Image: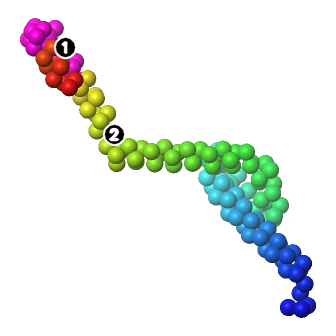
């Protein structure tokens, strides 16, 4: 360890972390290439070949050329995942049943109003049934 100074250890660790960051970025770019629905098959193949044959330059050019769209696709995917999660919570918690109960209450009131309009029930019967439904 005497022949490897502390500054060299620092530089080695810095380059190692930069290499790891580049690997993460490379995987992110490849994932984005396949996730982009606006890019046709040849475009995807071209970007993929560019990123594999010239990895550092390919990733850098991709991030410069398509970085904004990459961020938008990430945000869209996160928003869709959040909405699916919220829908799952609503189903599991049973708020759908409450919404269906409100709909059935409305349907029941409409049916009562129709019966009253046809003369099948009196005003007093209508008010009693309405009070019972709303309670």
Q: Would residue 72 be visible to someone looking at this image?
A: yes
Task: Indicate yes or no whether the magenta region holds residue 114.
Answer: yes
In front: 48, or 85?
Answer: 85
In front: 92, or 28?
Answer: 92
Q: Tell me the residue that label 1 is attached to.
A: 113
Quarter of the image where the C terminus is located: top left
Q: Residue at x 87, y 75 (%)?
A: 11
* Circles 1 and 2 in contact, beta carbons < 8 Å: no
Question: Where residue 31 appears, x then y in whole percent?
Answer: 64, 58
User: Which of the marked residues, 1 or 2, is nearer the chain's N terminus?
Assistant: 2
Residue interval drawn in magenta: 107-126
Q: CA distance from mark 1 to mark 2?
A: 27 Å
For residue 93, above or below residue 118 = below
Q: Residue at x 51, y 49 (%)?
A: 81
Question: Where residue 72 appears, x then y in whole percent?
Answer: 66, 44
Q: Residue at x 72, y 67 (%)?
A: 23
Name the element at disc 2: helix
Question: Which mark identifies residue 69?
Answer: none
Q: Residue at x 74, y 65 (%)?
A: 21
Name the element at disc 1: helix
Number of residues whose C-alpha sits closer than 10 Å to that of mark 2, classed few (under 14), some (14–19) or many (20 or more): few
Q: Tell me the residue that label 2 is attached to.
A: 95
Q: Quadrant of residue 2?
A: bottom right
């Amino acid at each position: 360890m005497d022949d490897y100074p502390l500054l060299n250890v620092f530089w080695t660790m810095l380059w190692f972390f930069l290499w790891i960051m580049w690997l993460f970025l490379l995987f992110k770019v490849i994932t984005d290439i396949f996730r982009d629905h606006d890019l046709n098959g040849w475009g995807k193949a071209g970007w993929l070949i560019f990123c594999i044959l010239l990895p550092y330059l390919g990733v850098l050019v991709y991030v410069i050329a398509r970085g904004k769209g990459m961020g938008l696709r990430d945000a869209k995917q996160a928003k869709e995942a959040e909405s699916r999660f919220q829908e799952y919570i609503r189903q599991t918690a049973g708020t759908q049943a409450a919404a269906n109960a409100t709909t059935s209450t409305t349907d029941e009131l409409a049916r009562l109003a129709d019966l009253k309009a046809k003369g099948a029930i009196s005003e007093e019967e209508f008010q009693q049934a309405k009070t019972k439904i709303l309670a």
